Amino acid sequence: MRSKLLVDAYVESLVGIFSLRVPGVGPTICSMAPEMVVESSFSRSHLILDTKRVLERIARSGTALATTFDQITMAFVAAMWDTLTSHAHYAAISTKPDVQFFRHLRNACAHGGRWNLNSLKYQAQWRTKQLSMAYQGEVVFGGLLKHGDVIQIFTDIDKTYFEGTPST
């Protein structure tokens, strides 16, 4: 699967986000890795994360888990869209109903997590989900789609257009 690394990174991110909120995990992480360093190519510009402070900030923020899931999911959708549009046969598959559905999903993620349907020039359908203008302005996750659907659409598109020869 061409997008496997992206899917794996998404799942790992969600597990990490969820784990940080499990009681008892924070102190364990702090004792094992009091600092986490993300290196920069510039000297003395590394991002040094003080684990305890990061965890305290998460606890104080009161940000709902669903909001954090929304943010990481929207970033993942954008990355997967970039992978799809770089496909050698993108022009031939761009008007397929599942690709159109995914295009509108990507646009919604770029517009605050709400469907932003100026028009539906082509059919936009994935599995049993079909977009219509009635969804304009509605939230994406918690409405027509759930967070777990994202992995399914990516897997379907990957199997259809990356693992085989696309039908044009």
Image (tube, rainbow, N blue to C red):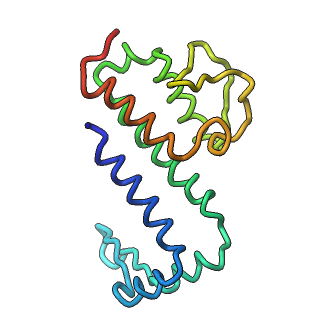
Residue found 45% across the figure and 82% down from its top:
51
Residue found 58% across the figure and 52% down from its top:
70
- Residue 15 position, x and y percent, is 43, 62
* Depth check, front residue: 14 or 122: 14
* Depth check, front residue: 41 or 121: 121
Residue found 64% across the figure and 40% down from its top:
140
Please identify the residue farthest to the top as the structure is shown.
Answer: 168
- Residue 89 position, x and y percent, is 31, 18
Specify the quadrant that holds the N terminus. Answer: top left
Q: Quadrant of residue 94?
A: top left
Decide if residue 6 is on the left or right side of residue 122.
left
The relative height of residue 144 versus residue 142 in the rendered view (above or below) is: above
- Residue 66 position, x and y percent, is 61, 57
- Residue 32 position, x and y percent, is 34, 86
The relative height of residue 54 versus residue 133 in the rendered view (above or below) is: below
Decide if residue 11 is on the left or right side of residue 52.
left
Specify the quadrant that holds the C terminus. Answer: top left
Residue found 57% across the figure and 83% down from its top:
56
Number of labelled discs?
Answer: 0
Please identify the residue farthest to the front as the structure is shown.
Answer: 128
